[in-house]
Amino acid sequence: MADGPALPPGGRRRPALGLRPSSGRPQVRPAPGPAAGREKHLWFPPAVPPPVQSRWLGTGVKAPSGAAARAFEELQKDEAEDAQSGQEKTFMSPPFEDTELNINHPYYDVARHGIIQLAGDDNSGRKVITFSCCRMPPSHQLNHTRLLEYLKYTLDQYVENDYMVVYFHYGLKSLNKPSLKWLQTAYKEFDRKYKKNLKALYVVHPTNFIKILWNIFKPLISHKFGKKITYLNYLSDLREHLKYDQLNIPQEVIQHDENLRAKQKGKLPPVVKIPPPRPPLPTQQFGVSLQYIKDKSKGELIPPVMKETVSYLKRKGVESSLRVTRCKQIIHGLPEHNYVVLKYLICFLHMVSQESIYNRMTASSLACVFGLNLIWPSKGTASLSALVPLNLFTELLIDFYMNIFNSRTVPGEILP
């Protein structure tokens, strides 16, 4: 081999940088250096372009495909539309900087951007936390793992009670978006502790990118959690759910909302197809006029559903009356002394049940406490199967105290 430049320490020369050709076989090519005496070594010629470094699929992965590719394309379309409308031609670091934040904050590097903020309470007094994509700096300036940790750190302060999250989607760009793997990790990190008391997740200004992303993650997201997600096209839609004035909405989001509304002005509202009214069924009782029911019921003035309901309630009322009558017969067959003691106790329990709105002790609750102690079998103890009829009997005594006991008075009896 011809003499060439001195070898680096270690006696081996590092090969020149290049890309692997489609065949995957290296070629021999002179290394850069003086024209004379260059040393030949292995080198990969640039037969194919470098792979697209899509953060949605992870570093070093070739151009995205399938649903992830469509999501990436939709995000690029959103950026192109913003550029055409003059909203934002190039990505710039968010100007927001929380000057009041203590530099000793455990997540100062993330918190200072104001991406995640507590925004007061909603109309039901539940805490509201906002996430603003437009305040996310480029990915090389933000550690997304730290962002996830800070999000959990913030939620940990409120997840023991009901809370809500507002996600401002506008501002998510190619340069600041996290990877799909990060999103998947984030969803898995938020276990039942975080999902249980989350009452609503509002996604403001959703785009086709969000819809495609939803399809990607749909197999991972439970149906119950999916029902908590609400999409809002405009900021004004938040007013019916939250205390809008308490929200610290980034100015970029407000400007984007105004631009969206300006585009909608002059456009005709979408045509809503209303199905033709269906004729009522011959036996229909609700949603029709009384005259219609009368005509279909051979001139009957009272609707059949009302007559049948009243008849059912009357039958049940008679059954209850028969039960009270039977209870009265049993009680009046007691010896005088037993009767006086029972009457004294039931009178007091009846008085207690009348104040159940304050003391929570209804006749049913009192019967569960005293029923088993008032009535005993002749031999042994009451079986479990006898508990229900014993409690029901005692409940009737308490509820219908006046009907059962007032017809019999024993000399010398006293009442509480």
Image (cartoon, helix red, strand yellow):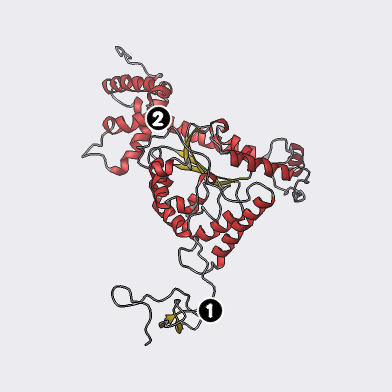
Query: How dense is the environment of label 1, judged by Cα within 10 Å: few (below 14), some, or many (20 and up)?
Result: few
Image quadrant where residue 234 sits: top right
In depth, the one of 186 and 389 nearer the eye is 186
Residue 287 location (% of width, % of height): 70, 41
The answer to whether one can see residue 260 in this image is: yes
Work out which residue is located at the far left of the displayed protein and give it: 380
- Look at 46% across and 67% down and name the residue there: 60
**In this view, 208 is above or below 268:** below
Question: In screen coordinates, is 285 left or right of 369?
Answer: right
Residue 201 location (% of width, % of height): 51, 44
Which residue is identified by label 2?
396
- Which is nearer the N-term, disc 2 or disc 1? 1
Quadrant showing the C terminus: top left
Quadrant showing the N terminus: bottom left
| Label 2, label 1: how far apart the Cα atoms are | 94 Å
Residue 113 location (% of width, % of height): 47, 42
**Discs 2, 1 touching: Cβ within 8 Å:** no
Query: How dense is the environment of label 2, judged by Cα within 10 Å: few (below 14), some, or many (20 and up)?
Result: some
- Look at 67% across and 40% down and name the residue there: 258
**In this view, 244 is above or below 296:** above
In depth, the one of 400 and 366 nearer the eye is 366
Name the secondary structure under disc 1. Answer: loop
Q: Amino acid at mark 2?
A: Leu
Instruction: Single out the mark in the foreground, 2 or 1.
Output: 1
**In this view, 133 is above or below 121:** below
Which residue is identified by label 1?
47
